[in-house]
Image: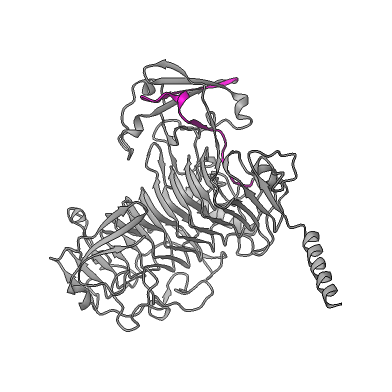
Amino acid sequence: MRKFKIIFYLLLLFSVGCSNGVKEYHVALTGSDSNEGTFSKPFKTISQAAKIAKAGDVVTVHEGTYREYVDPQNGGTDDNHRIIYQGAKGEKVAIKGSEIINNWQPVKDNVWKVTIPNSFFGSFNPYQDTIWGDWFGNKGRIHHTGEVYLNGKSFYEVESLSKVNNPKPLADAVDSIGSTYTWYCETSKASTTIWANFHASKPNSELVEINARPACFFPTKTGLNYITLRGFTISQAASQWAAPTAEQPGMIGPHWSKGWIIENNIISDSKCSGISLGKEKTTGHNVWLGDMKKDGAIHYIEVVFRALKIGWNKENIGSHIIRNNTIFNCEQTGICGSLGAVFSQITNNHIYNIHVKRQFNGAEMAGIKIHASIDMLIKSNRIHNCSLGLWMDWMAQGTRISSNLMYHNDTDLFTEVDHGPILIDNNIMLANTPYAECSEGVATVHNLFTGRIAHWVDAGRYTPYHLPHDTWVAGLITFFGGDHRYYNNIFATSKEVMKLKDPTGLAKYNDSKQPVRIAGNIYFNGATPYNKEINSFENKTFDPNVTIEEKENEVFLHINVDESLLKVKTQLVTTELLEKAIVPNAWFENPDGTPLKIDVDYFGAKRSETNPFVGPIEGLKLGVQVIKVW
């Protein structure tokens, strides 16, 4: 009888599972979209699975390259009932927004051309689609969302056929030689012709691809929550400019939803942005260009209030997790988010080569560019070789930027017109300008800087601040300067920065209108302390000689440590010490409202409770140190 009961309950559990309809769908290039989507009879496209997958389902994609725009039709219902899209374990799975072109015709020398019927592109032709939007700078010419790739490396669009025939290095490009691989296009009602200079390569014998889709994984519908995307290589999409006042497109993105996880992917070669966590269209789409009589900032304030009206809050939007991805070769941002990134975590990503072609510009270029980073955690990311590493623009409140490694950027971090509280702790920031700020209510704690701190006040700009841990706007206010805290940082001025006329250190806060709290910092090589600082130490003659060494996938910090570090009297940084940010009247605290302590270092090692080491690494030894930091 007992054996019968056990079998009965097992059958009952099985039947309940089946009645819930939870399934695993399989996709393989050998399959057919008329199949059932099982392991033995898989679908051929991810898009077919995305039409039918529902909460709790898993879509497993097998080896190969899938050239499609995946537009999910459904979302999950909560964290325990997600829709998971995953590359099969141990298999290389790519999603590309491009198509292979192998019928190039020689023109002369290294120049080849191809003529493609417009029907090839369907309803979207990237060679008729021009990049545009609020705060976009075209440098006086037209840019298309199309692109040409030779063996995975993108070319540079030029504005005339003569510049394909006689290419010259682009002065602003980081890769001077690469900028001579050029292309140009012309279109008619019937066809598109592309000319490209392949140098010594024969395009029909190599892998040549062109952009054909605006995205790779991006729902056209909003509000599709709790989707996981993991284990893919995703690249080569004709993404449009992502302005904060527009529907922010990206090669990948949740499109105004909640609870996505994007993890363990390799993401590259988006024409503009790799991952977009940004807003949707009804609250405004490039509204400044539609009405230039008002300033763009006023338009964005109106966008914020329209977003609140349609449900911009923690219950509906944000709380995404972006982790363990490698993101590179995107020409606007690696990750962007206007309003839609609230309450999210961006952790342990490797982001590099963002905005390095520099054929166009604008006010939106960075490895990570967020508007309204409310209660966001940006932690343990490696960001390098970008025009700007992190850009926290407008409404950064409850934001924590912790234990990131940033180097070889023009600027590592910029906080712009924010009122705080913002906590910047345990970071290694080695640009000539590691930190630029036009904000207030910022606590900068236990960081290592090798360059100058850029600080200015913009008294003419009114921007929102919010109720603590909420999107609800508490008010609008301009900037007075000050309300900063700098505790336990190392200012190790490099030789290159010493040549600049702008002084390093914190002396530029001597005349702040609002109070500043500055203590326990150390200054090397001419960096200058704040004039009322207590417990600081200044060593004008010692050079810590801070450098970065890259060895394959590892990064090592070289630093010379002398006894100066032992002479700085510090204190453990806590919510109580930092007090409230003045404008929002909000504590520096955890997102759940509990007090915080900076009691661990860059590596997560425990700090001394009574006299923690200055800088991001606890317990540094004297002499030349070589420390693995990634």
x then y, percent, for residue 285: 57, 44
Tell me the residue at 14%/66% (across/down).
Answer: 540
Q: Depth check: 624 or 163 in front?
A: 624
Q: Quadrant of residue 454?
A: bottom left
Q: Quadrant of residue 529?
A: bottom left
In the rendered image, the quadrant that contains the N terminus is bottom right
Q: Depth check: 456 or 318 in front?
A: 318
In the rendered image, the quadrant that contains the C terminus is bottom left
Q: Residue furthest bottom?
A: 610
Q: Depth check: 164 or 19 in front?
A: 19
Q: Is residue 26 magenta?
A: no
On screen, residue 424 above or below 45: below
Q: Quadrant of residue 57?
A: bottom right
Q: Is residue 50 left or right of residue 386?
A: right
Is residue 455 something one can see in this rendering?
Answer: no
Highlighted magenta segment, given as a residue range: 190-219
x then y, percent, for residue 147: 48, 33
On screen, residue 428 above or below 274: below
x then y, percent, for residue 269: 47, 41
x then y, percent, for residue 296: 48, 48
Tell me the residue at 63%/30% (across/down).
Answer: 122
Tell me the residue at 51%/24% (across/down).
Answer: 102
Q: Is residue 196 magenta?
A: yes
Q: Residue furthest left?
A: 541
Q: Is residue 194 left or right of residue 37?
A: left
Scheme of image coloration: one colour
On screen, residue 189 above or below 355: above
* Count of picture labels: 0
On screen, residue 108 above or below 561: above
